[in-house]
Image (cartoon, rainbow, N blue to C red):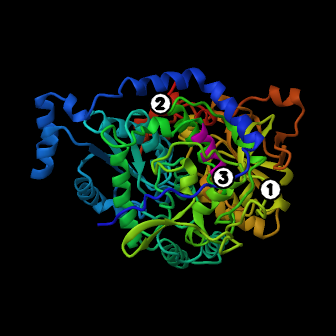
Amino acid sequence: MTTVDSSAPPAFAHAPLHPVVEQVTQRIIARSRDLRTAYLARIAQFRGRGPRRAQLSCANQAHANAAAEPRTKIWLNQAQKPNIGIITAYNDMLSAHQPYANYPDQIKQAALRCNATAQVAGAVPAMCDGVTQGKPGMELSLFSRDVIAQSTAVALSHDAFDAAICLGICDKIVPGLLIGALAFGHIPTIFIPAGPMGSGLSNKDKAAVRERFAQGKATQQELLEAENAAYHSAGTCTFYGTANSNQMLLEAMGLHLPGASFVHPSSPLRRALTDAAVEHVVQLTEQGQHYTPIGHVVNEKAIVNAIIALLATGGSTNHTIHWISVARAAGILINWQDFDELSAVIPLLTRVYPNGSADVNDFEDAGGPVFVLRELLAAGLMHGDVQTVYGQEGLFGHTKQPALVQDRLVWQALPVESTNQEVVRSVSAPFASTGGLRLLEGNLGRAIIKASAVPVESWVICAPAKVFTSQDALVSAFKAGELNQDFVAVVVFQGPQANGMPELHHFTPVLGSLMSAGYKVALVTDGRMSGASGKVPAALHISPEAAQGGPLARVRDGDMIELDVSGGVLRVLVPEDEFAARSLRVLRPANVDDTVDFGRELFVNQRRFVTAPEQGASTLFE
């Protein structure tokens, strides 16, 4: 049996906390005080009740125990040992989630060895954004996060579990699982990743084939071969998009075991880490030695740490939406100003595609999340004094890398320097002095841009608008030769209320190819682009959205649009009175409903009641 090195790490030398990090954190604490106090009170009222199973009636227990194997059933009937609820997002269409097929059995066996039991409490939907890109199904993607949160709550509602294990990796799935778990803040919870697929065709070469196909210079067969060479086996896609950003943020919040994110699915180390996660979560129960409910792990400092990890690694813009909802689920209120002020002082420490040519396997080999956390903590750019599921020395305990030494799981110190300076760097020699995301503001509203993916020479653009109401319309204009010029693509009615805020990667190769041809191009939209926005300057998530009567609905072809990343500016250069007097574009004619297929008709209420992106684009909270 794999054992865990439980020796405490040595004292960690670090600088005092950066004043801006402290200032933003204190502002969040003050802003959230009433909501957070009420949330913590809910956790306290569930404390000290012993095994949850013992609270059930005999009939309740019989139903919950009926299908258990004999040894487990005996222990469940005794209702004296910790019982772990497994929430799984397994399906075998998502390459990242396919490895989870056998995890429940492994977890159950590991639990028995730890004098505990485990049951699959429930499953959650897990759609693949890579499959639905540019298709009607993508309009359900963002809303699936809230469905996942609700499904997690349904699974845990049986009140039969003393701890929870969440199996999920990708896009909306991790935020949804986390939101749902936080609704049961009294339950200790650990996330277990499955790791990335091996490196295939490089992301840079894949993008080049996509651009050539958009230009008519590559056949569909060539494109398919390139895509298959890039996405080729079980594991997470290897670019640093939302799925892999999820893993970085979970490590920064202490919800993984240290260094667990990017270990390959078939590695013996991966199996050892999964067993160790079970051992740790059993110890976090009320029956264990270190009761640590998830609602205590996810506090204001942990949320700030997650934002900082996102900024330092150039992570996905999606998390400027998702983590607002995650924070809200824990009684914490954050906004884009918090992201922006932190980004001004957090250095960019990684170059992983689309922010560079490396993939997450290169990132892991160069030191990975553990190296980044160690650097940020040492520089006083993160909170170390937090609770984590690892339970040793706060977040400082997450600054060592896991390894197998004679079949024993241990955590070892990393080299002082990154092993690949082109992929990961120290705080003393970063890729940039500021973080990967910026807030843009002006007379078009508020937007987020992934600055780390955009070449500095493209940070400022002032060009005429070309307005589109769909991705297909933009692609058609490109094929007709109408976009061979400097311009700003303004794509409207892509926000949460309009159509569920799908990701807009369908036209990314088109805009990328125009930039490669020497044109100055940018994108302005109330839609999303996730972590793979690429080199095109993209002002995303514009709020208020066009469907709510936001200023974007007044932009016309030919209006000059100014986008300035360094200045944080986004505006249309039209006289104020003239712009205000314009009529608003209409989302769709009153007698037309183009959202009545692919299940979109079932989500009409989500579109109607969803909050704005800066409020988490959520249907769960007032």
**Label 3 residue SS:** helix
Amino acid carrying label 3: it is Leu
Residue 101 in sight: yes
Q: Is residue 166 left or right of residue 443?
A: left
In-front residue for pair 30/588: 30
Residue 617 in sight: no
**Label 1 residue SS:** loop
Neighbours of disc 2 within 10 Å: few (<14), some (14-19), many (20+): some
In the image, is residue 139 part of the stretch drawn in magenta? no
Amino acid carrying label 2: it is Leu
Mark sitting earlier along the chain (3/2): 3
Q: Magenta region: which residues? A: 301-310
Neighbours of disc 3 within 10 Å: few (<14), some (14-19), many (20+): many
Amino acid carrying label 1: it is Ser
Instruction: Check residue 433 in the rendering and tell me which mark sits there, or answer none.
Output: 1
Tell me residue 41's x, y (percent): 45, 22
Q: Residue placed at 78% from the left, 58% from the top?
A: 521
Instruction: Check residue 552 in the rendering and tell me which mark sits there, or answer none.
Output: none
**Label 2 residue SS:** loop
In-front residue for pair 531/27: 27
Q: Which residue is mark 3?
A: 377
Q: Which residue is mark 2?
A: 620
For the residues labelled 1 and 3, the Cα–Cα distance comes to: 16 Å
Q: Residue placed at 65% from the left, 64% from the top?
A: 354
For the residues labelled 1 and 2, the Cα–Cα distance comes to: 37 Å
